[in-house]
Image (cartoon, coloured by chain):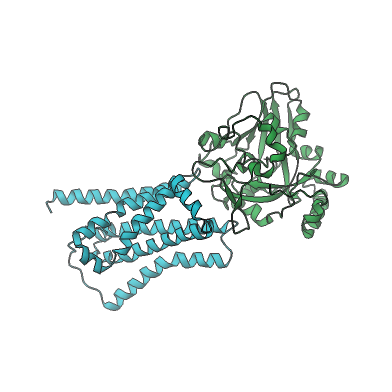
Amino acid sequence: MLIRHAPDLTDNDVTDRSLYLRRREFIGGAAGLGLLAAAGTASARGLTYGPGFSTTETPTSRKDITSYNNFYEFGVNKEDPSENAGALKTRPWTLRVDGECEAPTSFAIDDLIKANKLEERIYRMRCVEGWSMVIPWVGFPLKDLLAQVKPTSKAKFVAFETLKRPSEMPGQRWDTLQWPYREGLRIDEAVHPLTILAVGLYGDVLPNQNGAPIRLVVPWKYGFKGAKSIVRISLVEKMPRTAWNDLAPREYGFYSNVNPAVDHPRWSQATERRIGEFRRRETLPFNGYGQYVADLYRGMDLKRNF
Amino acid sequence: MDASVKRPVRSKRPSKTRDNLVYAVVWLACFAPLVWLAWRVFSDDLGANPIETLIRQIGVWGLRLLLVGLAVTPAARILRKPRLVRFRRTIGLFAFSYICLHLLTYIGVDLFFDWGQLWKDILKRPFITLGMLAFTLLIPLAVTSTNGWVLRLGRAAWQRLHWLIYLIVPLGVAHYYLLVKADHRPPLIYAAILTALMLWRFWDAFRRRAAGR
């Protein structure tokens, strides 16, 4: 395995110093401006960092992370989201959490961010198209949110529904995918400590093109599983429908775990190009998070359940 | 690449200077996309994934020039400018050059000369299989593009060989279509243009037969 685990290093040792300083500035500034109310809270508590989950690899540049995006709601080209997402209004924003649970709740986004302890998680992101990045997210574990609505024993899966608002999302005027975009996880995947809801990037408020105001990040799965601009999370009994699986079931499975041994029908998944690098690198099973998540799939045929 | 303009209506032969000038314009127009791409490479304007952007852009220009090449004959007939046909070879050879460069960038930069991977791609990835097939079929056309080869093969045989283009361009469009993830509009636009150009040819052949020519 190529993952370097260095318990003697903290994230501060590897985060570029200027970025580290900028994050502090941001938190002060954001609290003052009330942009990200929770950041103020986090600042008061002191930002906590992922318990060993963050990679020590060098993060991809902020410019690349915010200008090379797949977010078809804003257009199919990589530069479309950064060019078109400016019109999206992310306040007011309500996230409804419902379904098989005792306490279905609608959260105002700022209350939600305030109530949850934010952490920085530097994760690898592997796109199904064969490229990858290292992204410093700010967010909180999805399990913390799910615990608040008290899932019942019928909650076997979690369904994510994202915003449908063609007036602000020009890509939705054309049915490239079925809108709203839907994603889903099995409940054990959803409550895994690696799975987070991200509200920030590089210590800053999440840019619209990256899925503002709140998005899912599941680092061992292909990037498209990370639903962006989420409006509803439902606990459900049956495996939910997902957007890419609806479009091409042969090409995009429900699980979509990063797996170099299972090729996309039209291209190989054995290697990837890390954005900013010249040579391709080997793709790791579960995107290098196998030591944390491989157990979730024990006994499953991952070639069939791709 | 086809002989539908066998008997040009007599047209006034323009001056040599003007002829050369028009030729230079066509040549520069074919060359311009490459210059533009090279400029974008050097000014770091190809985005976060420059290698993929470069490969796709060069490929798309190759396809566009192939279609322009196929449009020359209909244009010459419709506009009654039979001498336009003399640009077909230039455009076709430029298309071939772009496609060579497209392939070289894929093999040399994307795969970094991993021949094993290339072979696997050709066998396993339908879009690469079709692309390589189209490229292979283009080679004899490029080789026999000279006047010498027309004489050597004889006009009729040369003509038949160059009908291969009617197979190659659809392969190129299919190659593009198959790599698209969700939004098939761009390759479908090329497919529509190709269909229009082919329909014109069928219609033209039918009309000529009906006229007993």
Q: Which chain is cyan?
A: B
Q: Residue at x 56, y 68 (%)?
A: B42
Apparent side of residue A95 relative to residue A17 in the rendered image (left or right): left
Look at the picture and state if B17 lies above or below A121.
below
Q: Residue at x 79, y 44 (%)?
A: A50
Q: Residue furthest right?
A: A44
Residue A262: tell me if it is visible: yes
Image quadrant assignment for residue A64 = bottom right
Q: Which chain is green?
A: A
Residue B189: tell me if it is visible: no
Look at the picture and state if B52 lies above or below A199.
below
Q: Nearer the viewer, residue B165 or A293?
A: A293
Look at the picture and state if B8 lies above or below B202.
below
Q: Residue furthest left?
A: B212
Q: Residue at x 33, y 71 (%)?
A: B23
Q: Position of residue A95 (x, y in %)?
A: 70, 34
Q: Position of residue A301 (x, y in %)?
A: 59, 31
